[in-house]
Image (cartoon, helix red, strand yellow):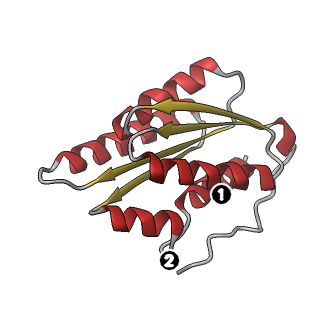
Amino acid sequence: MQDSSNKNIILKNAHELRMVIVKSSYHSEITNAMYQDAIQTLKSHGIEKIETIEVSGGYELVYGSQVAIRSFESVSGIITLGCVIKGATDHDVYINQAVANGLIDLQIKTNIPIGFGLLTVNNKEQALERTFGPKGQKGKEVAEAVLQSISLS
């Protein structure tokens, strides 16, 4: 496992940044843990203004991100958190691709960093490993990725 801790993130005026977390309520055991890791990471970097929007599932992360941009003044970055677990059909492929494309488009159109925190896994065990275990802490990793992007400007 690679250490995801990024001590090299340098943020100017971290206390002025406004971050929004868009979290899916589907697979809440996973998304709530990712959310807590993201919150802790933001606070550890001095971020004080943190807003949250909860959506029903992974597919709605794009719309929730768009609502965040329209609703909150001066959004510095968005962290999306969700989990899609493969089932008997290919629904996961369509959802994951649609969310990835939608978030990329929104990020390009708005010039606001948006982190892709949608776990795309084959089973619940893989999701748990990527949330609590040996495969990382995805909530923390996504938060750090967005902060790294913000530090570029």
Residue 144 badge: 1
* Callout 1 amino acid: Glu
Residue under the point 79% across and 44% down: 47
Pick out the residue farthest to the left. Answer: 89
Q: CA distance from mark 2 to mark 1?
A: 18 Å
How far across and how far down the image is residue 127, in percent?
40, 62
Helix, strand or loop under label 1: helix
Res. 117 in view: no
Work out which residue is located at the far top of the displayed protein and give it: 71
In the image shown, does 51 or 94 lie closer to the viewer?
A: 51
Q: Nearer the viewer, residue 35 or 118?
A: 35
Q: Mark 2–mark 1 contact, CB under 8 Å?
A: no
Which image quadrant for residue 111? top right
Instruction: Specify few, some or many for label 2: CA neighbours under 10 Å numbering under 14, 14-19, or 20 or more.
Output: few
Q: Which mark is residue 66?
A: none
Location of residue 130 in the rendering, given as x and y in whole percent from the top left corner: 46, 66
**Please, what secondary structure does the residue beneath circle 2 have?**
loop
Residue that label 2 marks: 134
At 62% from the left and 76% from the top, the residue drawn is 3
Residue name at image x 72 percent, y 53 percent: 40
Where residue 5 appears, as percent x and y from the top left, is 68, 69
Question: Which residue of the protein is positioned furthest toward the bottom in this rendering?
Answer: 1
- Foreground mark, 2 or 1, reads 2
Left or right, residue 136 beside residue 118? right
The mark that comes first in sequence, 2 or 1, is 2
Mark 2: amino acid? Pro
